[in-house]
Amino acid sequence: MNDTLNITKGINALKEQIDAPTAAFFSSCVHCGLCAEACLFYTETNDPKYTPINKVEPLKRVWESEYTLFGRLKKALGLAKPVTDELLAEWEPLIYDGCTLCGRCSMVCPVGNDISTMIRKVREGMVASDHVPEGLVGASTRAVKIGSPMGIRLKALQAQIKHIERDTGLKIPIDVEGADYMALLSSMEIINFPEYIESLAKIFKQANVSWTLSSEAFEATNSGIQIGSSDIARELVQRIVDGAEKLKVKYVISPECGHAFTAIRWDGPNLIGKSYSFKVVHILELLDELQQSGRLKTQGMEDKKLTFHDPCQIVRKGGVEAQPRRLLSQVASQFVEMSDPGKMNWCCGGGGGVSANERADDVRLKAFNRKKSQLEEINVEVLVTACANCRLILEEGLEENNMDMPVVGLSELISEHLLEENAVEGERDE
Amino acid sequence: MELFSNANDFLLWVRGDAFNIALGLFIIGVLVRILEIFLLGRKKDFSEARGTQWGPGLRNIVSRSVVDNGTFKRAPFVVVVGYIWHICFFIVLFLFIPHIELINALLGIQWPGLASQLVDAATVVAMVSLVAMLWHRLTHPVLKFLSTYEDYVVWFVTFLPLLTGYMAFHRMIDPYPLALGLHILSVELLMVIFPFTKLMHAFTLFIARWYTGAMMGRKGIVS
Amino acid sequence: MNKKTLFESLQQQGITRRGFMKYCTALTSLMALPPSMIPMVANALETAKRPSVIWLSFQECTGCAESLLRSHSPTVEGLIFDHISLDYQHTLQVAAGDAAEHAREQAMKEHHGKYLVVVDGSIPLADPGYSTIAGISNLDMLNETIEGAAAVVAVGTCSAFGGLPQAAPNPTGAVSVSSLVKDKPVINVPGCPPIPTVITGVLAHYLTFGSIPELDNLGRPKVFYGQSIHDRCYRRPFYDKGLFAETFDDEGAKKGWCLYRLGCKGPMTYNACATLKWNQQTSWPVESGHGCLGCSEPNFWDAGSFYKALSIPDGDYAKAAGYAVAAGVAVGAAAGFANQKNKANAVSQHTKVTVDDFGENKDK
């Protein structure tokens, strides 16, 4: 077998991806164009090439000529539109720069097509034919070879932990066998937002959660999912599964990172082809559960007007919608929703590997205008979110647009409002 | 017309052999398309389900008919005209007494119909909405970009039965057997191209909606 | 031969001038001519000579002749019929055998180029033996008789379109008059039977103008066959309102609602029943509660059940659908399994992607 990636492998990969839902989706599309109106890359650029259903053209061609009788007849007569290297090269920017896999199109399609899942499938073909952006190749290579897409090694994490332990006097448990929960982190949290680790430590201490980090599987970000290679994604998921099994934990906690959650929660078991021996929860699910059961107590209210940016992979593709709102209601007195909240929220513009792809910077900043106008409508002082990647993209977009507004992680906000230790004692005395 | 000695012969043929051919191709085509979809199958999902599939899948089949507010605001034309078109088309297709007689003969089920004048009005509205949608397709940047020859062929073949039906009802073609024959023939044309075009959405959208609803339901998302 | 004019023969029957003018008015309106034409019609009829008519009955049931004869006098149709010189009609004439045939031959000779030929019944081509008169095949007699005719009137659906004898499987190879007669004007007066007034109306037109009336593309006089039963039906408002009888004895039937669902062929049938009615304008089929059978249209016997709505296909669609389902399932399953194989093949050809495979990393 030839070991270079090429168009033949690309087409083969697309053939592998087509299943009954895909066939039903292609059969149903009537070219109504409504998906364009759901896609921030179209609404902010007005360029029709960003219409979601257009992005899946290579997959459609393969479906038609391989899996329909009429299409096969057309192919035999030489009338089928072929999938060529040139086609994939032309479509590569649409698939990687102009789509964050946010899944909004899949919510509005009147015939019910899950277009974003199909775009994810097209990425498999792009990978197999070597039509991938440099930035994502770099991130995936670092993820596989170094252990983190941002190139963070264990040493860097240990250094951050040392800082946190010194600052807070709290112990960050590592490699504790038999702990209930194994927490994962995204490299952005380690480098850009170590407050998250600190928040976990504080919250879990108060809630008396038995937890640990794994020195062998601390990275949650799955570049394989973003670049769209099941093979690479599987390797990265396997590391987490191995780490969790080694420490014999009952739960693995997905961090405040959208794609990490999708990768470990929904895609992971299918990538490795079996169910886990542990459960996966998103940190917001866990915090909500702790709070509901009374183990997590907060005090004081944020009185600034704030809103919540739903990370696509957590709400629309992950089903975590009510939890952040319940949590916010405990710590924020002036919470307002953006237009199109919850599962219909608009993406920050940087998901799905777009943030790791420098080539997409311009269009990503244009796409951010959607978020900008959403924020301008409600005039808030603070923006809360629950994804390190969203947070970084939002900060950059706000800065670019001279909008002075802090972006805060929800877990961090909760930890800031934890009931003081002595106050807890006092409560108990009563 | 050399093929037919008179309009009655023509009508006899479209109501007889031609209908059988069209019906046969329609049934074969639709069955092939649907079997092709289902036989491709889905991989077993190993992730831990948060919700069920069947309920949300069925729910999505219904709920997708309601357009979300954001889409309505952004594309009111497509939404409004789309609704008008489909509603009027269903009125014409399913509530005109002669059509009910046909359905009853084919499937053995029937329901009350509407006054012919109301159906006539719905036909006009359906034709106007189709023309409006064609105009929109030819002028809106996204639709213009997406449209293929198939979209226009399907438009034409969908428009024809409405036009011929309207003309037959108003006896604008003489003699009537020719008018009725042309109407039935145009429907047969629609039936023949149906399985090979996007018209299949009339069947497959239920499958598509179900799959998406089921997948989202599994994840605990209300689609 | 009687050389009296029509007016003279009417006077003989005790018809006054006033009565004659009344009759001319009725005739004019029947032929859909403007009232200003009445004097012209009267004048034409006053001076019209009795024309010689040869009536040939082939594969028929005598219903058409009955239709005409059963009309009660004094009617327009009766008067006209009385006026013509019916020189040959083997059901009615007194003469028989050679004498009868002789009368035909004589009329043909005497009025060569001027006589009218009326035909009821279709002509068998499969075997002449199916229908002969005096040992002469219908085809031969037709050809022989029309040779010197001024025009041919095909009375009844059998002679106009083939009718019942031509219905599938058409064992006698029956054909219509117009399919055989190409060099003489043929006026089709279809109906099973035709309305008597229509038969005599056509004759009156010929008497009045000496020419044949304007015909539609099926050779029928437009004045009688220009509008459909449906267009002139008094139950039409019920059709428009969507009010239909669903059985012959339901409320709708009792209220006189539209009979479309009971198989009425009125929408596709062109005839004057709804306006001229039958039996001295007493009633007509739809008025008596039965749908129109479409008897004045070609192929009406083969156009499906009389009791099936016009919108229902009349082939064996259930059988066609049955075969199609079987074929669809077979082809669909075959295609589906081929797809499965195709996909399994793609899966087996999968080569695992590693990060080292990217061109990006190879260049380094």
Image: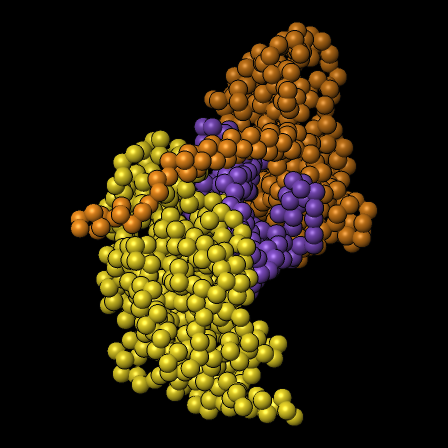
Number of numbered labels in the structure image: 0
Residue B75 lies, in percent from the top left, at 42, 67
- Residue B140 shows up from this direction: no
User: Which chain appears orange?
Assistant: C
From the viewer's side, name the closer residue of C359 and C6.
Answer: C359
Q: Position of residue C164 (x, y in %)?
A: 67, 25
| The C terminus of chain A - image quarter | bottom right
Pinpoint residue A125: horizontal percent, then vertical percent: 34, 46
Tell me the quarter of the image containing the N terminus of chain A. Answer: top left
**Chain B appears what colour?**
purple
Residue under the image location 49 percent in, 47 percent down:
A273
- Residue at image position (34%, 31%) is A77
Q: Give residue C338's position: percent from left, percent from top.
A: 47, 32
Would you place residue C300 above or below residue A212 in this image?
above
* In the image, residue B90 above or below residue A37: above
**Position of A289 compared to C15: left or right?**
left
What residue lies at 45% left-to-right and 57% top-to-bottom?
Answer: A243
Q: Is residue B107 left or right of residue B1?
A: right
Q: Residue furthest left?
A: C363
Can residue C131 be seen at all in this image of the molecule?
A: yes
Rendering colour (chain A) = yellow
Name the residue at 64% across, 24% down. Answer: C167
Most foreground residue, C99 or C349: C349
